[in-house]
Image (spheres, rainbow, N blue to C red):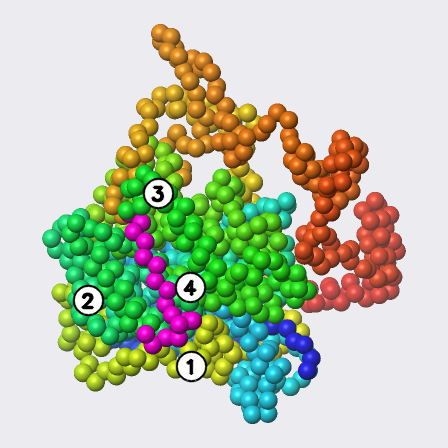
C-alpha cells in the first residue's frame, strides 16, 4: 500500500460579492487567487420563505463574467430600462454568518454577512500557516424586495435585540482550521482515514469507499493527497442555528463557523528560534448567558460559563503539520454541575445560593461528565476552589453536593478511570500569612499535568529521541508513533469561574508550558521561574484571556490577578479592584437581563411564534433551557451505567478521537492527484498573488518576547522610542507617589478574584526605577539613582569572581556561538584549557530540512533560464540582443489578441 499524505481542506469561498436585481440576489464567492468561483441564487420575490439555489458548479473567472453579463442584459431587457444597469453590486464580504433569521412567521428573512474590508476581518494569529481571523464588523441584508415586503410590528424590536450580540467583540473564524476542535483532534483526524486505508479489511472496504464516493472520487488510483474536513463541534459553534436552514442546501465552503471567547498569540524567541505561544478559549453556546442569570447546569448536562482553554506551542520555522513540532494542552472551566441558582431580586452583593432540585442519583452531573469522557478521555480531574469553612453556609453548599455526586458516580466506574476530586479553599489560603498560594497551586499543577499528560506531535524521525528520561516517563497520557496524546482533562471551578479559576488555570498552564518547551528540546528541564521572558509573556496572555472572559460573563475585568496572589501588585491596584467590583455589580443588576435576551435570540434558544408570548414578556427563561421539563415521556439515562455506550472500552483515549465508523462519518475526505489550491497551505499562508507589506504582516507585528518582555533598566538603552521621556516620567511619578500600603490591604480588596491590565497598573510597577529625592525649596532634585540589583531584574546575584562551573557554562555558550556562525576564532583564547575540558559538545535533538528559515537550498535553473537571465542583465546595461523569428511571431500574436 503506498504511503499517502493528508492535509486540511481549505475553503474555496473566501471572497464574496453580492449582486442584486429586483427579483434575485446573486452571491458570487471565490478563492483568494480568484481562479475558482461559486454562485448562490437567492429569491427576493418570496416574502416569508428562504429560497436559495446552489448549482454546485465551479466557474472560472471568464465564465462568471459571462454569466453576470447575461444576467445584467436579461434583467434590463425585462424591465425595459436599457439606459440603466439591471444588475448592481450591493456589498463585498468575507463570509456568511447566518441566514433565515426569522425562524418563524413572525420575523422577516435576513442574511448576516461579514463585510469585506481590510479593517473588518483581521488576522490575529496563525496555527501552522492556517490564518485565524477576528470579526470586526457585520452587515445584515434584507432579502425580500420592497414590493413584496410584509412588515411585522415587532420586527424592529426583535432586530434590535438580536443585534445586541456584538459580533465585533471576540468572535473568530478560519477558512482552513477547525477552531471548534482542539489541535490534538485536528491532527488525529488527519491520520484517521490513512490508518483506515492502510489497515482496512475486505469487510470494511465498502464503508471506507462511501466516504470518497460523496465527493465523486474513488479510493483507487495509487498515490495521491487527501484533503480532510471534519464536522465542527457544535457546542462551541455560535452560529450553528443561523446556518441550519442552508446547511444541506449549499456546498460546505459557503458555511463559515464562528467561535466566541478569546484568541491570542505571542512570539517567544529562544536562541533565534521563533516559538509561537497561542491561547484559545472556546465559550460554550449551550446554556450560555450572564453571571447571576446562568448558574449550575441544565437538564442536558451543559453548565454555565463553560470555557475550553487550549494553549498551543509550535516552532514557526517549520509550518507543516506533518513535518513540524507542535504541542498543546487543554483545560476546562465551568459552573458546578448541579441544579442551583442565586436570587438577584434582593439586590445583594452576594445573593444566597439555593439548590433548585434534589438530584440523589446525580443525573445532571452524570450527563456532564459523560460529555467530558467522550471529548477528553480519562482521568477527569476536578479542582474545586470554593470555600470549605464558613460561619454561615454559602459556597460550602455546592462543595457538599458536588462531593456526593462524584462519590456516587465513581461507584460504577473502573478504579483506574475514576473521577479525581481535589478540594482546595483558595480564599482561605490567600488570607493566611503563612501560606504561599501559588506554591501550593504549583504542587497541584505538577500532579495534574503528570496525570493527564499533554499533546506533542513530532516528525517520525525525532520520536526515538523524544526525551527518553525519567521525567518524560513519569507523564501520563498515551504514547503514539508521532509523540504523545493528552488523555483526560482538568476541570476547574469556583463560584463564578472567573478570578480564582483564572489564576489556578494560569499556574497549571505554566507547568504545562514548561513540559511543552522541554518536550520540544528548548529547555533542559521542565521547570520555569516567574521572572523569565517566557512566563511574563504567558502571564500577559492569561490576563488578557481572563479579562475577556470576565467581561463576557461577569460584566467587568478581573478583580484579582496573578500579581495579587503573588503579593507584588502595585498600591494603586486596591482602588482599581473596588472600581471593577462596582462595575461588575452594576452590570449584573441593570444590564444582564437584556444581554441574556439577546443571547437567547441569537443562539436560537427562543424562537418567535404566533400566538405565543414574546421574548420580553417571559417572566423567566428557565423552560427555554430545560426543555425536558415540559415532556412527561422523556427517556432517562441509566442510574448505574451513566456513560454513553462505547466510551468505556476506549478509555483512557477520548471516544471522539478513536478510529471507528461513527467518527469516520463525521469526516469529508477528498482525494487529489497532486497538491491543489484546496490543500496548498503554502499558497494560503504566503499569498504570492497579493501585494503584501511588512508593516501589515501579523508575524512581524505580534507580541515579541525580545521586544516586549525583556527587563527594562535605566543602566541599559531603553527599547522604547521615547527613551528619555519615558525614563524621566517614571522618575517624576515615583518621586511624587505616596508610599504603598501593606500587603494585607492589597490582598483584601474583594471576595472573588479580579484586577486590571498591565498598562493601567500605574506609574510605580516592578519595572519602574526607584529613586530617592531631596526637597530643597522650590526645586526637587534627584539625589541618587538607586539602580535595581541584578537579583531584582534577573533573579540571580553576580559575584565579583565567577566560579569555575559558571565559567565552564559560559565557555560552552561561546562554543555554541562559534559552531553556529563559524567565525571569531580568536574569542576562544580567553577560556583556559582546563575549562575547555568541561565544555560539552551540544548535539541538537532535532534537525531541519534544507528549506527553512535557517538554511535554504539554492534553486536549480536549466541552461535556457540562465541565458534568459543573463540577457536580462545585459539589457539593463543597454546591451540589447537582436530579436529572432520566434520573438517576432510571439509579439504579433500578442498584438492580435490584445487589440483585435
Q: Is residue 616 left or right of residue 213?
A: left
Residue on which disc 4 sits? 489
Quadrant location of residue 797?
top right
Residue shown at the point (60%, 49%) measured from the top left? 524
Residue on which disc 2 sits? 621
The residue mark sitting in front, 3 or 1, is: 3
- For label 2, the SS is loop
Residue on which disc 3 sits? 435
The residues tagged by marks 2 and 1 sit, at their Cα atoms, a distance apart of 35 Å
Question: Could you tell me if residue 8 is visible in this image?
Answer: no
**Relative image position of residue 174 (x, y in whole percent):** 48, 63
Give the class, few, some or many, for how many residues have Cα within 10 Å of label 4's Cα (few <14, many ≥20): many
Give the class, few, some or many, for how many residues have Cα within 10 Å of label 3's Cα (few <14, many ≥20): few
Residue 423 drawn in magenta: yes
Q: Is residue 121 left or right of residue 552?
A: right
Q: Which residues are magenta?
A: 411-427
Farthest residue to the left: give it. 346
Decide: is 75 above or below 170: below
Numbered badge on residue 731: none
Nearer-N-terminus badge (4/1): 4
Amino acid at each position: 500500500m503506498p504511503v499517502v499524505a493528508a492535509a486540511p481542506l481549505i475553503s474555496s469561498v473566501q471572497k464574496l460579492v453580492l449582486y442584486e436585481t429586483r427579483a434575485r440576489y446573486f452571491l458570487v464567492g471565490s478563492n483568494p487567487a480568484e481562479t475558482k468561483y461559486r454562485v448562490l441564487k437567492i429569491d427576493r420575490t418570496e416574502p416569508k420563505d428562504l429560497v436559495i439555489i446552489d448549482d454546485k458548479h465551479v466557474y472560472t473567472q471568464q465564465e462568471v463574467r459571462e454569466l453576470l453579463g447575461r444576467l445584467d442584459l436579461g434583467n434590463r431587457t425585462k424591465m425595459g430600462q436599457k439606459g440603466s444597469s439591471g444588475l448592481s453590486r450591493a456589498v463585498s464580504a468575507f463570509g456568511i454568518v447566518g441566514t433565515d433569521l426569522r425562524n418563524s412567521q413572525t420575523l422577516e428573512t435576513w442574511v448576516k454577512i461579514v463585510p469585506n474590508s481590510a479593517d473588518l476581518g483581521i488576522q490575529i494569529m496563525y496555527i501552522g500557516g492556517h490564518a485565524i481571523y477576528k470579526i470586526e464588523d457585520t452587515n445584515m441584508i434584507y432579502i425580500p424586495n420592497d414590493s413584496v415586503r410584509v412588515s411585522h410590528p415587532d420586527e424592529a424590536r426583535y432586530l434590535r435585540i438580536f443585534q445586541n450580540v456584538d459580533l465585533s467583540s471576540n468572535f473568530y473564524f478560519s477558512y482552513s482550521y477547525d477552531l471548534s476542535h482542539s489541535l490534538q483532534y485536528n491532527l488525529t483526524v488527519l491520520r484517521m482515514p490513512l490508518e483506515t486505508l492502510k489497515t482496512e479489511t475486505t469487510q470494511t472496504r465498502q464503508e471506507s469507499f462511501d466516504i470518497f464516493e460523496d465527493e465523486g472520487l474513488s479510493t483507487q488510483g495509487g498515490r495521491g493527497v487527501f484533503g480532510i474536513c471534519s464536522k465542527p463541534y457544535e457546542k462551541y459553534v455560535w452560529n450553528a442555528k443561523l446556518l441550519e436552514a442552508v446547511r444541506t442546501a449549499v456546498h460546505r465552503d459557503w458555511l463559515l463557523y464562528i467561535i466566541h471567547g478569546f484568541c491570542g498569540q505571542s512570539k517567544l524567541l529562544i536562541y533565534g528560534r521563533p516559538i509561537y505561544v497561542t491561547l484559545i478559549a472556546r465559550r460554550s453556546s449551550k446554556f450560555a448567558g450572564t453571571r447571576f442569570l446562568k448558574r449550575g447546569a441544565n437538564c442536558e448536562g451543559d453548565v454555565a460559563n463553560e470555557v475550553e482553554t487550549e494553549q498551543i506551542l509550535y516552532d514557526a520555522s517549520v509550518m507543516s503539520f506533518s513535518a513540524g513540532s507542535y504541542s498543546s494542552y487543554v483545560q476546562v472551566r465551568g459552573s458546578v454541575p448541579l441544579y442551583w441558582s442565586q436570587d438577584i431580586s434582593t439586590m445583594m452583593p452576594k445573593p444566597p445560593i439555593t439548590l433548585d432540585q434534589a438530584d440523589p442519583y446525580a443525573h445532571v452531573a452524570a450527563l456532564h461528565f459523560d460529555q467530558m469522557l467522550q471529548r477528553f478521555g480519562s482521568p477527569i480531574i476536578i479542582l474545586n476552589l470554593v470555600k470549605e469553612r464558613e460561619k454561615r453556609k454559602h459556597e460550602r453548599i455546592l462543595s457538599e453536593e458536588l462531593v456526593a455526586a462524584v462519590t456516587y458516580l465513581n461507584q460504577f466506574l473502573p478504579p483506574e478511570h475514576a473521577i479525581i476530586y481535589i478540594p482546595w479553599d483558595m480564599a482561605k489560603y490567600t488570607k493566611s500569612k503563612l501560606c504561599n498560594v501559588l506554591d501550593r497551586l504549583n504542587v497541584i499543577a505538577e500532579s495534574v499535568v503528570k496525570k493527564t499528560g499533554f499533546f506533542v506531535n513530532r516528525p517520525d524521525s525525532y520520536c526515538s529521541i523524544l526525551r527518553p528520561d525519567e521525567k518524560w516517563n513519569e507523564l501520563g497520557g498515551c504514547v503514539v508513533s508521532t509523540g504523545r496524546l493528552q488523555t483526560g482533562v482538568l476541570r476547574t471551578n469556583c463560584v463564578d469561574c472567573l478570578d480564582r479559576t483564572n489564576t489556578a488555570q494560569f499556574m497549571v498552564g505554566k507547568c504545562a508550558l514548561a513540559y511543552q518547551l522541554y518536550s520540544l528540546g528548548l529547555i533542559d528541564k521542565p521547570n520555569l521561574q516567574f521572572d523569565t521572558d517566557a512566563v511574563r509573556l504567558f502571564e500577559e496572555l492569561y490576563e488578557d484571556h481572563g479579562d475577556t472572559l470576565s467581561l463576557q460573563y461577569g460584566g467587568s475585568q478581573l478583580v484579582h490577578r496573578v500579581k495579587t496572589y503573588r503579593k507584588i501588585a502595585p498600591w494603586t491596584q486596591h482602588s482599581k479592584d473596588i472600581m471593577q467590583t462596582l462595575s461588575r455589580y452594576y452590570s449584573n443588576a441593570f444590564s444582564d437581563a437584556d444581554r441574556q435576551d439577546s443571547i437567547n435570540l441569537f443562539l436560537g434558544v427562543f424562537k418567535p411564534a404566533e400566538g405565543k408570548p414574546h421574548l420580553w414578556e417571559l417572566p423567566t427563561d428557565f423552560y427555554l433551557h430545560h426543555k425536558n421539563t415540559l415532556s412527561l415521556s422523556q427517556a432517562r439515562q441509566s442510574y448505574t451505567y451513566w456513560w454513553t455506550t462505547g466510551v468505556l472500552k476506549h478509555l483512557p483515549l477520548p471516544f471522539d478521537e478513536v478510529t471507528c465508523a461513527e467518527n469516520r462519518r463525521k469526516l469529508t475526505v477528498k482525494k487529489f492527484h497532486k497538491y491543489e489550491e484546496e490543500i496548498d497551505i503554502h499558497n494560503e499562508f504566503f499569498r504570492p498573488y497579493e501585494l503584501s507589506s511588512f508593516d501589515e504582516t501579523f508575524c512581524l507585528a505580534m507580541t515579541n518576547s525580545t521586544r516586549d518582555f525583556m527587563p527594562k533598566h535605566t543602566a541599559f538603552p531603553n527599547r522604547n522610542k521615547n527613551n528619555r521621556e519615558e525614563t524621566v516620567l517614571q522618575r517624576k511619578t515615583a518621586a511624587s507617589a505616596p508610599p504603598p500600603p501593606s500587603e494585607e490591604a492589597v490582598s483584601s480588596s474583594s471576595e472573588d478574584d479580579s484586577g486590571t491590565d498591565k498598562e493601567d497598573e500605574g506609574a510605580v510597577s516592578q519595572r519602574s526605577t526607584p529613586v530617592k529625592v531631596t526637597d530643597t525649596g522650590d526645586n526637587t532634585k534627584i539625589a541618587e539613582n538607586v539602580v535595581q540589583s541584578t537579583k531584582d531584574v534577573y533573579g540571580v546575584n553576580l559575584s565579583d569572581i565567577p566560579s569555575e562551573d559558571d565559567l565552564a557554562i559560559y565557555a560552552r555558550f561561546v562554543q555554541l556561538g562559534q559552531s553556529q556562525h563559524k567565525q571569531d576564532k580568536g574569542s576562544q583564547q580567553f577560556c583556559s584549557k582546563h575549562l575547555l575540558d568541561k565544555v560539552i559538545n551540544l548535539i541538537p535533538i532535532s534537525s531541519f530540512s534544507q528549506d527553512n528559515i535557517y538554511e535554504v537550498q539554492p534553486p536549480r535553473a536549466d541552461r535556457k533560464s540562465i541565458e534568459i537571465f543573463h540577457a536580462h542583465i545585459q539589457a539593463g546595461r543597454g546591451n540589447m540582443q537582436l530579436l529572432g523569428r520566434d520573438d517576432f511571431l510571439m509579439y504579433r500574436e500578442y498584438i492580435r489578441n490584445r487589440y483585435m
